[in-house]
Image (tube, grey):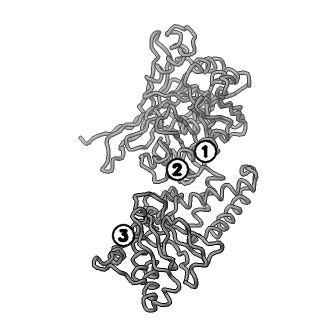
Amino acid sequence: MSLLDRVQRKAGEGATSPGEDAQQTPTPSAPAPAALAPTRPGPPTFYTPDLPGGVELPAPTGWQVRHAPAVQRRAEPPATEDVQSPANATATAAAVTLATPSVPMSAPATSGSFQGALPTAPAPEALGNTVPLRPRSAPPLLMRTQGGPAEPSDPARQASLLNRTALSRGPLTKPGSNNLYAQLRSKVHQRLVEELAGNTGTAPPEQVRQRIAELVNEMVVEQNLTMTRQDKQRVIETVISDVLGLGPLETLLNDPEVTEIMINSYRQIYVEQRGKLSLSAVTFESNEQLMQVIDRIVSSIGRRVDESSPMVDARLKDGSRVNVIIPPLALRGPTVTIRKFAKEAFTVEDLMKFDTVDESMIRFLRACVRGRLNVIVSGGTGSGKTTTLNILSGFIPEDERIVTIEDAAELQLRQEHVVTLETRPANIEGRGKVSIRELVINSLRMRPDRIVIGECRGGEALDMLQAMNTGHDGSLTTLHANNAKECIGRLETLVLMAGAELPSRAIREQIGSAVNIIVQQSRMRDGTRKVVSITEVLGTDGEHVQLQEIFAFHQTGLDEDGNVLGSFGPTGIVPHFFDHLSAEGEGVPIELFQSLQVVGDN
């Protein structure tokens, strides 16, 4: 029952017994004209004598009364009535008070009547045995004055933590919550760090996994969440990846079909599968989460990345190559490129299975490496140079001492006697940098039988050529070039970058005497990698370095699916070092170099 209904009901009861009402309630006097002056007092109140000490509560505002038309119609007094009965006067005064709360007026002492700006408030004893009005909860009109009921939240705007695992499932967030499961993950992570005092890296992984599962179950019960077993397991796996792994990247790193991961921003990740690029459904939640993963990668090898040093080369535990560049150089946010290495290093059989080389080329290259010839693997970016270099290094005999030099250690040699050296960037003060060239110079004092340089990019090319010409035969390295001829020009340019003012003829003579074999590798149109040429370096004729091709890949076209068609084969030229291989005990049959002649029908 509303407040006005109770006032009117009380007025009706007074009309049935005018005598009793006259004894308890004095007849209201007409307001004086001065009382109707346009003053602006505070909002009207009603008095509740049953509460301790009496409490004055605010009456409904004019906005609420104006939105109750039925009450306003009852509040209009009859135009022809000059004399009102006590009951009618009570109801009229109460209604007028509600309709015009800003105008001060006297009101009857009837229980529940509203008081305007009265000179003195009536004492509780003057109200007699009337039934007081008790304060009630806010009616719907009061809720509307506070902005209206909350609209249901849009599920599309609620980014769930589990959406980044790229698994098919419906939204998990509850209406009205903001990323509820992200908060759940954050709380579990925070409590885990508190319990382990931040030693999640040193604690046993099984203990961390078990405690994460327990914390997720506890938090679900505490927050009274409704989750299926499958969803709960996804939350547990996500937290485990964040704490012990690389967060969302764990899904891609564990996928054997993914060979490269390219993170353009925290919301856009491309992957390479079977030589083709595609957009992945896996994303990060924010740039902050991506930066945490980056810091975890680079700090594991003692490097850093920040605004003063926004570029860094790193590696993962399995040897995968990582390149990071962050703002202000990367305008769209942190950018990461990961070139994955297989769980197990590729073998010769794998290369033949991928149709990268054929058996005759493998036999020839094995003889060249074991016969201590200097080999350069040339190719473009992403052509598979490092993979081929890793396999060629596997041909080195077990009883030889091997020193590898790389920017980021990627080679996976299976020999026992291997020394791995890695460059070091400058510290925050700009000191302590160690380049590949310095490592090459130092490696000459380490009594190496073989020197394997991951990639020549600068002045270290001069030191490598000098090492090849001073008794360190059988060295291997890689170089960026599109073909064998450009490889020679590129090598000459790198030697000039060393700062030595050597004439071009002297540099070419160094190259002609040091390098024996150039293995050219390319990434084909269909995404496959192939050794397209094996070239012998003959020396110089005074001005130019002489080359001759021994093996080649002849492309004939594309099939209906866009796959490259072609065949490997010798060119028919016998290399000049054929006798040298025989003298080293690594001879190959001369028939290996005879090209197949297709005889047509006459």
Q: Is residue 582 at least partly visible in the picture?
A: no
Label 2 or label 1, whichever comes before in sequence order: 2
Horizontally, residue 96 falls left or right of residue 492, namely: left
- Expressed as whole percent of the image width and height from the top left, the position of residue 593 reads 46, 33
Q: Amino acid at mark 3?
A: His
Residue 482 is drawn in which quadrant? top left
Closer mark to the observer between disc 2 and disc 3 = 3
Total of numbered circles in the picture?
Answer: 3
Q: Residues within 10 Å of mark 2 (few under 14, many from 20)?
A: many
Q: Residue furthest left?
A: 602
Q: Amino acid at mark 1?
A: Gln
Residues 291 and 442: in front is 291
Label 3 or label 1, whichever comes before in sequence order: 3
Residues 46 and 155: in front is 46
Per the image, the residue denoted by label 2 is 284
Quadrant, the C terminus: top left
Per the image, the residue denoted by label 1 is 292
403, above or below 169, in the image: above
Per the image, the residue denoted by label 3 is 67
Q: Is residue 533 at least partly visible in the picture?
A: yes
Q: Residues within 10 Å of mark 3 (few under 14, many from 20)?
A: few
| Residue drawn at x 65%, y 53% as measured from the top left | 243
Residues 553 and 127: in front is 127
Q: Residues within 10 Å of mark 1 (few under 14, many from 20)?
A: few
- Expressed as whole percent of the image width and height from the top left, the position of residue 244 reads 66, 52
Q: Residue furthest bottom?
A: 16
